[in-house]
Each structure stands twice: as C-alpha cells, then as structure tokens.
Image (tube, grey):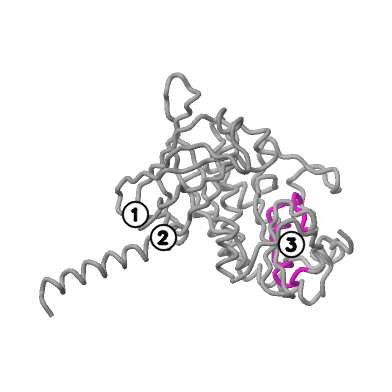
C-alpha cells in the first residue's frame, strides 16, 4: 500500500476512534464537565414553554481540555421548582448539526438541573439530589444517566454583567433511556403500580423508601416515567428527587395524601408483593451497603463535612430498618399498599 494512503487511513481510523469514545463519554465519565452559559432568567421563565425555546449557547471543555461552543435552545420545564425557584429547571436542545464528533454527540436533548436559589449552600442540595441518581444506578438498571457540571453562569438580567459559579447536572433524555432498552416511554397512560414488573418495581419502591421520597405516583406519572419493554412488561423510571429526606431542601413539603409530618420521615409506598421477593430485594440492598456509602464518599470535595455526615446518617437509618427483622416487617412488609 502507498505510504501516503496508509497514513491517510490511519488518520481516518484515529478520528473515527476518537469520535466513538466521545459518543460514549458524556455519561460514562464521572468527571465534572466545565460549562459556561449566558441567558436571561426572566426571559427563559416568561417566554418559553413546551414548544418555544430561547436561543442561546453552551461553551464546554472537552476531555482534551479544549473549549467548544454549541448553539442550543433552552426552555423551562417542571412544575414546583419552575414556580418556586430563582433558577428554573431547564430543558436544552442542541441545534441541528450541533454536537457532532464531540462530547455531546448522541445527546441532542438533555435536562439541566440548576440550584434552586442563590443561597450560599444551594449547591449542596444539587449535589445531594445528584447523589440520589447515583444511588439508584447502583440498585436498578432502569435509570436515567446523569453527569455533574460546573457552570460559569452570566444572567443577562444582571446589569453589572457579573458571572457566578454554580453546580448542576445533566439528565439523559427519556427517549435515550428507552432506546437503550429497545423500549418506549408510555405517555398519558394511567398505569397502576400493581401491574408493573414486580422485581424492578420492588427495587424502585425500596429505593424511594431509602431516600425518603413519597413524592411520586405511577398512575399519574408524577416524577416517574413508564418504560414499556414489551407487550407484558412495564417498568418504573424514577426521577426528580429533590423533595426527599436525603436532599431536604428548605422548600420541601409533604403531600397531604401521605401520613407523615416531614419529608425526612420514611414511608414505604410500594405495592404489596410476594414476601420472599421483598426479602430477596432487601438482601440485594444489604449486599450493596458499602457500595452505596462509597457513592457518598465520592462527593466529599463538593459539599461541607456536615452534609457528608448527614447523608451517611440518613442512609444508615435505612439500613438499620433492613437489618432488624421486626422493623423491616413493620415498616415494609405490613406497610405496603393494596390500592393506588
């Protein structure tokens, strides 16, 4: 083979290899992605909706440390935080032909979680919610992938033009999760928890109990998507974990539909299943105890020591229940629901 042709083929191969690695890197790496964003919070809140996006851009640092810029569209999403937080949750859509051959290849639609407020400790609540997604990935295969980002943000509403440093994270798009499992997301379908696949449902329900979350419903698809794998199998896809005992933000409140006083109290809201299955899933969680504590340890550089201590103690409360037969029976086996 001509040596120049050989060199050309090598370059093409290396370029393709680099692209293939980048295609996977967004959610495969645990390193924080450095990004810069600039937009008007007021304009985002007042002028965008499910179908209207605000033109903006995202500057990011790729794995080689080189800055790149993407043209993106932004819109508000969510309910409670959209109405009650200074920074609303965001859906970001890359413009056509953007995100090719770079870190965002294959991830055109993403959700962005910003801190709720401008308070000094607001980042800690973002980190704790991110932890919940990381914990869920350790106990269930049916999860949204996430990636922590450090945002240099300039609010165009600020006449001084000053930027601020925020922590946030990216959440994989619903359809990308469905693609990973050759399934589909069921929209506007009333699915009772009792008919969902039992093993994945018990993992989901016990996880929600672990993080102290009662703010979810399968029948109303509240903070939950339903993943259909085949004609007989539907799976819960949980998200939005801020209103939980593990995160415990200042705005956390308990629904009047559940019999607890604060979100830090645990209440098992799973449906009654075969007792042997519940005990089997309990044993799965117990076997992963050190792994779950390890997820907290990885966040030590991002939050104060007292937050690490809080997360460890809250997780310990869960494992104390699992390890005590009488408490497990009272709090889980006899607390399960028979109706929606």
Q: Which residue is mark 3?
A: 205
User: Residue 216 in magenta?
Assistant: yes
**Judging from the image, what secondary structure is the residue with disc 1 in?**
loop
**N-term mark: 3 or 2:** 2
Residue at 15 percent of width and 73 percent of height:
5
- Please check the rendered image and state whether residue 37 is part of the magenta-colored stretch, yes or no: no
Q: Quadrant of the N terminus?
A: bottom left
Vertical position of residue 218 compared to residue 254: above or below: below
Residue reaching furthest to the bottom = 1
Rendered position, 29 above or below 45: below
Residue for badge 2: 25
Give the labeled residue for mark 1: 63
Give x and y (percent) for residue 20: 37, 66
Q: How far apart, in angstroms, are the residues tagged by discs 3 and 2?
A: 30 Å
The foreground one among 136 and 234 is 234
Residue 202, picture quadrant: bottom right
- Residues rendered magenta in the picture: 196-218
What secondary structure predominates along the stretch shown in magenta?
helix
Q: Which residue is pictured at 59% across the width and 47% down the height?
A: 128
Instruction: Looking at the image, tell me whether mark 3 or mark 1 is earlier in sequence order.
Output: 1
**Location of residue 8 (image quadrant):** bottom left
Check the image and report above or below for 189 versus 110. below
Q: CA distance from mark 3 to mark 1?
A: 37 Å
Residue 97 percent location from the top left of the image: 40, 52
């Amino acid at each position: 083979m001509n040596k120049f042709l050989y060199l050309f083929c090598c370059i093409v191969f290396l370029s393709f290899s680099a692209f293939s690695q980048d295609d996977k890197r967004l959610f495969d790496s645990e390193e924080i992605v450095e990004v810069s964003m600039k937009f008007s919070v007021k304009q985002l809140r007042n002028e965008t909706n499910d179908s209207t996006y605000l033109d903006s851009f995202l500057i990011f640092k790729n794995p080689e440390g080189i800055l790149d810029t993407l043209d993106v569209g932004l819109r508000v999403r969510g309910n409670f935080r959209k109405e009650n937080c200074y920074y609303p949750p965001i859906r970001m859509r890359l413009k056509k032909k953007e995100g090719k051959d770079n870190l965002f290849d294959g991830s055109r639609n993403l959700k962005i979680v910003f801190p709720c407020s401008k308070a000094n400790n607001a980042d800690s609540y973002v980190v704790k919610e991110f932890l919940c997604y990381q914990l869920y990935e350790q106990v269930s295969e049916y999860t949204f992938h996430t990636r922590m980002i450090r945002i240099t943000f300039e609010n165009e509403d600020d006449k001084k033009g000053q930027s601020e440093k925020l922590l946030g994270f990216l959440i994989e798009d619903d359809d990308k999760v469905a693609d990973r499992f050759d399934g589909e997301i069921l929209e506007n379908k009333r699915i009772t928890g009792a008919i969902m696949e039992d093993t994945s449902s018990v993992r989901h329900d016990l996880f929600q109990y672990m993080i102290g979350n009662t703010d979810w419903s399968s029948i109303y698809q509240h903070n939950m998507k339903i993943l259909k794998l085949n004609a007989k199998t539907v799976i819960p896809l949980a998200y939005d974990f801020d209103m939980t005992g593990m995160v415990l933000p200042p705005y956390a409140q308990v629904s009047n539909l559940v019999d607890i006083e604060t979100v830090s109290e645990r209440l098992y809201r799973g449906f009654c299943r075969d007792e042997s299955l519940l005990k089997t899933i309990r044993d799965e969680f117990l076997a992963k105890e050190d792994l779950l504590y390890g997820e907290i340890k990885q966040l030590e550089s991002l939050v104060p020591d007292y937050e690490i201590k809080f997360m460890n103690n809250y997780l310990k409360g869960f494992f104390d229940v699992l390890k005590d037969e009488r408490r497990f029976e009272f709090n889980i086996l006899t607390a399960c629901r028979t109706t929606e």
